[in-house]
């Protein structure tokens, strides 16, 4: 089957290479990954929820533990703890059991006929003299003793009232003296303290030190504590200390003994802590075991288990998600493949020679951009094809005229119509030279397009190049009645190929002379140009400079009719001439300016054209003034 007879849809795509099938496979994989990720997120979320529940249980346990430790710090036994345990069980929703060895002291939710079976390990041990620092961090800073255990340090009502009056006076003093709004806080032992904003120290003018002095009941308890601490230190062979009401101590007490070096801080701290516990032990409840569990004596279970119906429900949900994903992906795949098929058909039409093939552009996604790019490519190819055909036609036209003239003269000689004299030979030679000129121009353009235009650059005097060009085109200017003039600094130099530079300038001069009326002037002017900011890359075999610090500006201007503004952008196009009839009245092949642009670009320079209709035209060449070896 020939190419033109090929089916419009083209051969079918193998199933293994189908974009739709691959899209479905990717969608299935993505769906499986999505479901897996969703399950992982669900598990993680469940784990977080469990940890939150555990955190809530821990907070409830800490609350329960704190309440019971406070009860033990204020009571000598557990006889009346039942209502407190029942209230804690009601507020926390847990079963709370307090035991002393094998004896149950209190149970928030007893089960009739079923005695409580304790777990191997209790939740915590309630002991106000050895508080768990994780559950009650404040007690850890007090040496492990609950601050609510005051024992013999409790003030009498008279002592507390007297200190309260003093504290109120300090608050009033602060309000009038410093403007601070303080308040009185009464501690567990009945001792009032003054709290200032941001816990700043009390102003010395208000004499708050009296609140820190021990009262008689506290002095009696401190003396007993000093004796216990001294006995502890004496057993370690260390000197005694005096314990202050805030728990600090001083190594000044000798009790008749010569004081040696102060006792180590760690030993004193241990003795003070153990002595305080020994002193407070008769005033607090004995240690008891705390058990916290779920209602009805059920232990909390953090293992997340799924029943068979739940697992089946999850499986059906996953299958439904997979089915929906595949269906949506198939629909999207069909919509994706449809414009690709249209692109394929249009590309096959272009392959068959239809340069007008286009596809419809809908939307703004990647495929729409691909379709737009295809249409732009097709339009550009159509333009290039038209340009190619026009160029072939132009080349044929340019070559046909001199060939037809040569053939006509030779046939006339052969038929005996024209004698083969010198005039005939000169005419045939002129046509042959014109033909050679067109061929040389085409060869130069072809070499420039392929990057094979070789340059033999050297240091040149710009004035000399312009003078040689004027000398070479003098006869042409004289024949057309135009005057050639040169303005150039003799010291101005440029790095260039002398032959190619004269060719470029000569093409401009020849073009200017042809378009200048008799009596007009063609001016060649060379000046120093500003630095070239962006150098043109060097082609293979081209020694043109890659950078330059300064440049040379060469202008070729005429006093001809000028170029229309709409024609000015096309003056460097190949075979373009303002004479649409292509009458050859002004001569030329239409390649001269195209060659000028290629030659100047090969030197790393630029060329531009300007014109004012009715005044004349100016062509400007800009070249770098230094070469790579300089």
Image (cartoon, rainbow, N blue to C red):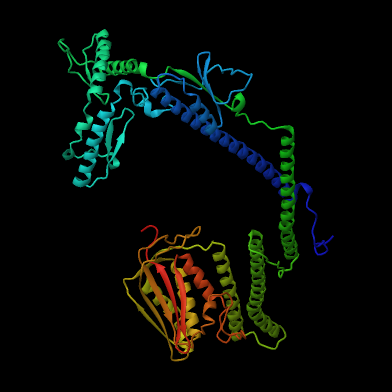
Question: Which residue sits at x=74%, y=59%?
Answer: 338
Residue 256 at x, y percent in the picture: 15, 10
Question: Which residue sits at x=21%, y=14%?
Answer: 240
Residue 451 drawn above or below residue 564: above
Residue furthest toward the right?
A: 1
Along the viewing direction, whichever of 94 and 309 lies nearer the viewer: 94
Residue 293 drawn above or below residue 379: above
Residue furthest toward the front?
A: 158
Question: Which residue sits at x=60%, y=82%?
Answer: 425
Residue 100 at x, y percent in the picture: 49, 15
* Residue 213 position by quadrant: top left
Q: Quadrant of the C terminus?
A: bottom left
Q: Quadrant of the N terminus?
A: bottom right
Question: Which residue sits at x=40%, y=58%?
Answer: 628
Number of numbered markers: 0
Residue 437 at x, y percent in the picture: 57, 75
Relative to residue 210, is residue 157 drawn left or right?
A: right
Residue 240 drawn above or below residue 291: above
Along the viewing direction, whichever of 36 and 172 lies nearer the viewer: 172
Residue furthest toward the bottom?
A: 519
Relative to residue 238, is residue 551 drawn left or right?
A: right
Along the viewing direction, whichever of 520 and 56 lies nearer the viewer: 56
* Residue 444 position by quadrant: bottom right
Residue 313 at x, y percent in the picture: 73, 39
* Residue 229 position by quadrant: top left
Along the viewing direction, whichever of 568 and 360 lies nearer the viewer: 360
């Amino acid at each position: 089957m020939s190419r033109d007879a090929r089916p419009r849809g083209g051969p079918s795509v193998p199933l293994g290479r189908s974009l739709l099938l691959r899209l479905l496979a990717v969608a299935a994989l993505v769906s499986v990954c999505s479901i897996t990720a969703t399950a992982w997120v669900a598990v993680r979320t469940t784990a977080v929820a469990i940890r939150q529940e555990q955190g809530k249980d821990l907070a409830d346990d800490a609350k329960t533990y704190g309440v019971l430790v406070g009860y033990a710090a204020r009571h000598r036994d557990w006889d009346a703890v039942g209502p407190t345990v029942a209230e804690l069980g009601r507020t926390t929703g847990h079963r709370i059991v307090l035991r002393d060895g094998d004896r149950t002291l209190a149970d928030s939710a007893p089960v009739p006929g079923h005695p409580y079976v304790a777990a191997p390990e209790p939740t915590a041990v309630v002991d106000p003299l050895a508080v768990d620092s994780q559950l009650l961090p404040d007690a850890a800073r007090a040496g492990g003793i609950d601050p609510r255990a005051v024992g013999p340090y409790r003030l009498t009502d008279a002592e507390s009232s007297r200190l309260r009056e003093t504290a109120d006076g300090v608050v009033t003093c602060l309000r009038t003296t410093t403007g601070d709004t303080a308040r009185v806080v009464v501690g567990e032992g009945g001792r009032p303290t003054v709290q200032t904003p941001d816990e700043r120290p009390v102003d010395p003018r208000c004499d708050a030190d009296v609140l820190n002095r021990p009262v008689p009941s506290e002095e009696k308890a401190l003396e007993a504590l000093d004796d216990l601490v001294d006995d502890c230190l004496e057993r370690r062979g260390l000197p005694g200390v005096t314990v202050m009401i805030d728990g600090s101590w001083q190594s000044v007490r000798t009790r008749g003994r010569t004081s040696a070096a102060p006792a180590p801080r760690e030993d004193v701290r241990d003795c003070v802590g153990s002595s305080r516990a020994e002193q407070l032990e008769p005033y607090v409840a004995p240690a008891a075991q705390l058990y916290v569990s779920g209602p009805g004596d059920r232990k909390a279970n953090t293992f997340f288990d799924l029943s068979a119906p739940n697992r089946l429900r999850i499986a059906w949900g996953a299958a439904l998600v997979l089915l929906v994903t595949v269906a949506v992906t198939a629909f999207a795949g069909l919509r994706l493949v449809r414009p690709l098929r249209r692109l394929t058909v249009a590309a096959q039409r272009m392959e068959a020679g239809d340069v007008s093939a286009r596809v419809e552009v809908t939307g703004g996604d990647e495929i729409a951009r691909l379709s737009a790019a295809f249409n732009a490519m097709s339009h550009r190819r159509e333009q290039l094809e038209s340009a190619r055909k026009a160029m072939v036609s132009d080349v044929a036209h340019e070559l046909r005229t001199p060939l037809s003239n040569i053939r006509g003269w030779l046939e006339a000689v052969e038929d005996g119509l024209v004698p083969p004299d010198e005039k005939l030979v000169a005419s045939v030679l002129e046509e042959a030279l014109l033909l050679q000129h067109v061929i040389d121009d085409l060869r130069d353009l072809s070499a420039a397009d392929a990057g094979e235009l070789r340059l033999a650059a050297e240091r040149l005097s710009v004035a000399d190049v312009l003078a040689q060009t004027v000398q070479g085109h003098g006869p042409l200017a004289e024949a057309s009645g135009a005057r050639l003039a040169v303005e150039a600094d003799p010291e101005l130099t440029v790095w260039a190929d002398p032959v190619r530079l004269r060719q470029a300038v000569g093409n401009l001069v020849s073009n200017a002379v042809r378009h200048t009326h008799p009596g007009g002037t063609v001016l060649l002017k060379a000046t120093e140009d500003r630095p070239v900011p962006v150098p043109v890359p060097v082609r293979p075999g081209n020694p043109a400079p890659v950078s330059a610090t300064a440049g040379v500006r060469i202008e070729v201007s005429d006093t001809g009719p000028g170029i229309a503004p709409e024609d000015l952008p096309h003056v460097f196009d190949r075979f373009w001439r303002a004479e649409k009839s292509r009458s050859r009245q002004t001569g030329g092949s239409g390649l001269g300016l195209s060659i000028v642009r290629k030659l100047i670009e090969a030197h790393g320079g630029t060329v531009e054209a300007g014109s004012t209709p009715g005044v004349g035209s100016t062509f400007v060449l800009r070249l770098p003034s230094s070469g790579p070896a300089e």
